[in-house]
Amino acid sequence: MAEPSISKQNLDRFISLVRPELEKLGFVYKDGVDASSSRGSFANGFFVSPKYKIGIIFSKDRLGSINYDIGYTNIGHHSIFTGLGLHQKNRLKYNGDIFAMYSYTLDGSPLHEAFLEDFKEVIFPYFQSSPIEEIKDFMLKEREKMGL
């Protein structure tokens, strides 16, 4: 069997750090793919619950966009904060430039800590307190603003 790519190794490290907290919230981890594209190796995986799916992707040593999927639509981590008017509050930032496409923190703190704080303090409470149809409408509106 082939050695996992550097992307998969980095994804697995990240997952090991966030899995305990997300499992407490009812999510189960599912492996995605360990593959290559024109940009090089990438690996992804998903935390799933009955209503939501969180997609996490690594390209080599960089965490890409974390995406939230509800049924037939999805939205990036950073877009949720922007749509809620909290774009200055999220600790996990995203450089969506076509040549960059990676997540980062302004203070250099660990990515997994920033993600978990953002998720537990803003995203998960929003998901829990809002009707699923309202969240889907919110996601579709945010995607429309981005031209998607």
Image (cartoon, rainbow, N blue to C red):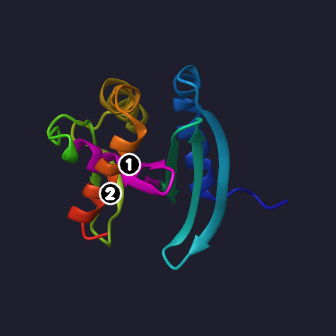
Cα gap from disc 2 to disc 1, whole angstroms: 6 Å
**Residue 64 shows in this picture:** no
Image vertical order of residue 26 relative to residue 112, above or below: above
Q: Contact (CB < 8 A) between labels 2 and 1?
A: yes
**Magenta-colored span:** 62-81
Label number found at residue 14: none
In reply to whether residue 74 is colored magenta, the answer given is yes
Crowd band around label 1 with a 10 angstrom C-alpha radius: few (<14), some (14–19), many (20+): some
Mark 2 highlights which residue? 140
Is disc 2 placed on a helix, strand or loop?
A: helix
Along the viewing direction, whichever of 29 and 7 lies nearer the viewer: 29
Residue with the mark numbered 1: 136
Q: Residues within 10 Å of mark 2 (few under 14, many from 20)?
A: some
Residue 147 visible in rendering: yes
Spot occupied by residue 144 in the image (x, y as percentages of width and height): 26, 64
Query: Residue placed at 37% from the left, 53% from the top?
Result: 75
11 displayed left or right of 90: right
**Quadrant assignment for the N terminus:** bottom right
Relative to 45, residue 111 above or below: above
Query: The disc labelled 1 sits on which kind of residue?
Result: Lys
User: Is residue 20 a member of the stretch shown in magenta?
Assistant: no
**Corner quadrant of residue 95:** bottom left
| Residue 17 locus on image (x, y percent) | 53, 30
Horizontal side of residue 44 vs 99, given as left or right? right
Residue 79, percent from left and from top = 27, 50
